[in-house]
Image (tube, rainbow, N blue to C red):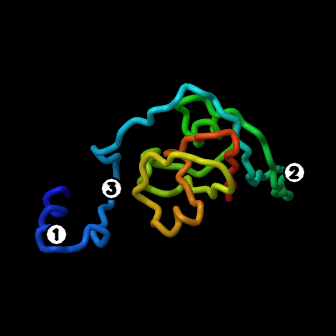
Amino acid sequence: MQLYREVLSSMNIPKEQIHMEYFDASPENKPFEHDGISREVLINYFQDQFFDEDEVRTFECTRLIEVKAGQTLLEALNENDIDVPSSCNSGTCGSCWATKTSGAIQMQNNYALTKEQVSQGTILLCQSYPLDETVSIRVE
């Protein structure tokens, strides 16, 4: 893949027009350097409740969860029994997307979302770390 990137660059193809699709973590991935502080994050999500064999209701829930230092939002959600679709855990598949509604996060790697999606607040939970106490996300 690196060879193809170099060839396209040598042909004067603009860097922003070269798209690389990784199916595994890129060798460029760097671990997140955290500040050692746990943070509380407000999570809005939907949960199915089964009442009997024929009745399932979906409820909108809101919870405040702790995200430990160095822990991704996806890891914290799983630790708090909040089910979120996920697959690769490396930022390549895009199945663990959510919307950041407030606060600051660091999305370490992103090989699935467009710049437009990111600018609209879409994040990958498996690659996102809260940077302050005002983070709020909505999981669809």
Is 23 on the left or on the right of 122, as rendered? left
The residue under label 3 is which amino acid type? Tyr
| Spatial CA span between label 3 and label 1 | 17 Å
Q: 10 Å neighbourhood of mark 3: few (<14), some, or many (≥20)?
A: some
- The Cα atoms of the two marked residues, 3 and 2, are separated by 43 Å
- Residue 96 at x, y percent in the picture: 55, 53
Earlier residue among tags 3 and 1: 1
Tell me the number on the disc at residue 26: none
Identify the residue shown where x is 58% and y is 40%. 131
Task: Tell me where residue 57 appears, x and y as whole percent.
Answer: 84, 57
Q: Quadrant of the N terminus?
A: bottom left
Residue at image mark 1: 8
For the residues marked 1 and 2, what is the alpha-carbon distance in whole angstroms?
58 Å
- Establish if 19 lies above or below 51: below
Residue under label 3: 22
Q: Which residue is depicted at the point 44% across and 48% down?
A: 88
Instruction: Please state the horizontal and vertical placement of residue 29, each as a whole percent of the image.
Output: 34, 43
Q: Which residue is mark 2?
A: 52
